[in-house]
Image: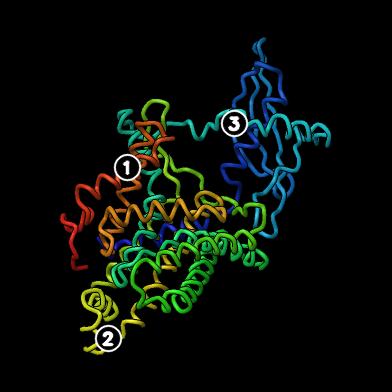
Amino acid sequence: MRPLLLPILVAVLVALSGCGEGFDTDQMRLCRQAIPPLNPTGAHIEIERATVGPVPRALRLLYRVQLGDGVARHRSIDCLFAAESNGLGRPNLIGIASDGRPMPDASFYFLRRFYLEDRVEPPPDPAALSTEDLPAIPSGLAYGLQQGLSSLPTAAIYGLLAAAYALVYGLTGRIILCFGEFAALGALASVVGVALLLSLPVSTPLTGLVAAFAVAILVAALHGFAMGRFVLRRLERASGQQILIATIGLAIAMSEYLRLAQGPQLRWLPPVFNTPLRLAHAGDFIVTLNPLATVLTLLGLGAMLGLVQLIRRTAYGRAWRAVAQDERTAALFGVDPRAVRDIAIVIACALCGMAGVIVTAIYGGMGFAGGFTLGLKALVAAVLGGIGSVSGAALGGLFIAGFEALWSATLPIEQRDLAVYLLLAIVLIWRPGGFFGDAELTPRQV
């Protein structure tokens, strides 16, 4: 099974590289939303097809209007979007033409200000409603399958951060409370990397994703090296909770550092490869799969699996296990505990940077203060899985993502975070070592 993962991933990426041209689903929706105010009230509007407009960056929608007297007319709308040369924002709608006639500036302003910003439900996309050639499944199964597919990117994000916590905790026995900020750092670095790439003539959506991962991982790893060298190394012999307090202060400092670097506005990446793939239907409900979310989930899960194999099968993994078991004895056999810890910190921060890229690519952006909640939930996942065990922490991240998806599908979503933290309290009472640790609260081998 594992040897087939890389060829499948490469095939998906090659297929996606050919579909980068065109408009994303957000732009399609915004253009459909502008159609109703251009037609009489109560008219039945049916979208026929979408195509490229008469000028660059213009989207044309062909639609049919059915009036109350039975008369049907075929019309068109052209939506012109701005070119974002710096890659730090979403392309804005800057003009509309109805049946080939440009809308006056004043009319366009009032349309955008008082109609498009109200998020009125647009006419449906006929391609999204078509159930031809789709297998029919029970409604409960379809709803559950959609919730599970939607939680896949979250599972990858939590798993990467939880594995980062466990990788360092297994060596030091201390929790680093700034990994969420490292994810926010990776998110901002990915936006800057894409912006730099877009200044080149060879930029494509696929190369943009590659640049985002490369820059985010490199920046997060370099900042992690600085944290290990100038903060953690000076506290490696400290007893008590000095490392915990120091990393809390570092988290606050990094959050302010990101605020100053990012500015007052949130930096967004334009969505790519987000046209949903239809899988099955239950009546009018269609189960869809986001191609980009699938690829990023596979990358995140692949990174977690690679980390587990690194610990189990490599010379560094043997050194990591030796230091985790008994640092002094490992040093007697020629293992440098300080070097092992430094490498672990760099790898953990690189995983956090990768998680930040996934957040940015799926959700568009991540604020400078978004790392706190993300890091806290990942810490819950690491504790549930058995902090100190890399594989257990990664599985804990998958469990938290599934738990959130199940809660959101069946119970009030505003109480979801409270349920996650309550679950942590219950598990600590029932099994302090986590699901994959010891049932007793005693020192255990990692």
SS of the residue under disc 1: helix
- How many other residues sit within 10 Å of disc 3, few (<14), some (14-19) or many (≥20)? some
Q: Quadrant of residue 405?
A: top left
Residue 422 - label? 1
* Front label number (1 vs 2): 1
Check the image and tell me how it is coloured. Answer: rainbow
Q: Amino acid at mark 2?
A: Val
**Percent x, y for residue 379?**
36, 56
For marks 1 and 2, the one nearer the N-term is: 2
In this rendering, position of residue 254 left or right of residue 419? right
**Percent x, y for residue 18?**
52, 56
SS of the residue under disc 3: strand
> Which residue corresponds to the image point at 70% horizontal and 32% vertical from the top-left?
76
Measure the C-alpha gap from mark 1 to mark 3: 50 Å
Residue 335 - label? 2
User: Is residue 156 placed above or below 216 in the rendered structure?
Assistant: above
Most foreground residue, 239 or 364: 239
CB within 8 Å, label 3 to label 2 = no
Residue 48 - label? 3
